[in-house]
Amino acid sequence: MDNFTFYAPTYFVFGKDQEDEAGKYVKRFGGTRVLIHYGGGSVVRSGLLDRVKASLDKEGLWHTELGGVKPNPRSGLVYEGIELCRKEKVDFVLAVGGGSTIDSSKAIAAGTIYDGDFWDFYQGKFVEKALPIGTILTIAAAGSEGSPDSVITNENGMFKRGATGEGFRPTFSILDPALTQTLPPYQTACGITDIMAHLLERYLTNTKEVEVTDRLIEGLLLTMIHEGPRVIADPDNYEARANIMWAGMMAHNNSCGVGRSQDWSSHNIEHELSAVYDCAHGAGLAVVFPAVMEYVYTHDVMRFAQLAVRVWGCSMDFADPEKTALEGIRRFRAFLVSIGMPQNFAELGADAKDIPAMAKCAVWGDGRSGHIGGFIQLSEEDIVKIYRSMV
Ligand code: NZQ
Ligand code: ZN
């Protein structure tokens, strides 16, 4: 196992109706003037926004609001949010929504107290400080409620980049599984796929002897394989939603990723797709991840065979472990299809003519220098081949 430090100070509040206590937690973490940030309207329609405002009012907290975060959140609204926070002397950002809303909130929280352009953070500058952020999560997917990361689409060119730093860990996150019951099945499945992808990015490691994190990842993947189909069949299944919601947090706050190298090439290859075609991040990953696995598995056949046996229930073919490794990838793909995820470029609305430009963008600029990936280094040429295998 590699050396590591791990500091994940988010205070989690889990369970039914806990969002009605939002004001209490904002106060506990020092907020007095609050920006409530939200998306395209699901929290207005469900009545959640009104409940959150009532909870802030109950604690006597001043608040203003900014809605309109789009999935694959855009830089333009971040600039607007920063201006608003400075004008109103906001000292706490409360995200009510999914990963896109939380990521936009993080960008606003860091940008408000930074002298330069907030995009500097998305070009590799570490986020040490931001206004305190609280989250009320409405979809189990991105894991931003516990992660030190944020992903924003730059509208000046439509490309996506991530920023990271301890300043981005939310001070508190409220996770009420019941809030996710209004999700359409497709969006639920996108979330399930993203959670599995966060686990698999960490599973693709070159670090030896990482049994504890391997087993945590495998356990969470098995949970998703069990609960995913249950929640697709019965969207009101609170217990299945609860397990998925906590798995989504565990998958990405890095408790499963410490002490080991990680890959992240699938995420970077996907981010080009969701930036250019505005598809859901999870749907893009459903197409990208199996394709990347098929491209890289020969680098460590036994790691893929282990995954196939422990997670996908394959029998180990000792004479031909490659067969076992490939069967695991086949079962992963079949699982994604069974929950309604796309399989190829056409189903994503992507066009093969954009492949050269996307491959270039994935490896150059904003702190990148020709390669991505921690499992094996992928070049622009490799990425072109991977994209072509999805057409
Ligand atoms: O905008 P509203 O109207 O709220 O609708 C949203 C949106 O259309 C809807 N939705 C959310 N909760 C709902 C609901 N609809 C009905 N009922 C509910 N309870 O779902 C749609 C998708 O929301 P979004 O926030 O975009 O989803 P998700 O959480 O999957 O976030 C995706 C973003 O996170 C980034 C992705 O790149 C993408 O931009 N990621 C962020 C990470 C991080 N910060 O650590 C890591 C991830 O790997 C990922 O890259
Ligand atoms: Zn993701």
Image (tube, rainbow, N blue to C red):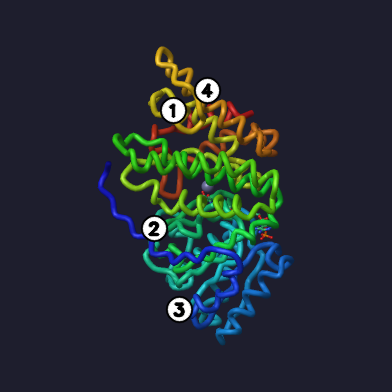
**Residue at mark 4:** 327
How far apart marks 3 and 2 lie (CA) works out to 30 Å
Q: Are marks 2 and 1 in contact (CB under 8 Å)?
A: no
How far apart marks 1 and 4 lie (CA) works out to 10 Å
Mark 3 or mark 4: whose residue is earlier in sequence: 3
Q: Secondary structure at mark 1?
A: helix
**Residue at the spot 59% in from the left edge and 31% down from the top edge:** 333
Pick the front one: 77 or 210: 210
Q: Dividing the image into 4 quarters, which one contains the N terminus? A: top left
The amino acid marked with disc number 4 is: Glu
**Residue at the spot 38% in from the left edge and 38% down from the top edge:** 374
**Residue at the spot 62% in from the left edge and 74% down from the top edge:** 52
The amino acid marked with disc number 1 is: Phe
How far apart marks 3 and 1 lie (CA) works out to 46 Å
Whole-percent x and y of residue 250? 46, 52
Mark 3 or mark 1: whose residue is earlier in sequence: 3
Q: Are marks 3 and 2 in contact (CB under 8 Å)?
A: no
Q: Which mark is residue 28?
A: 3
Circle count: 4
Whole-percent x and y of residue 288? 56, 35
**Residue at mark 2:** 125
Q: Secondary structure at mark 4?
A: helix
Residue 191 seen by the camera = yes
**Residue at mark 1:** 304
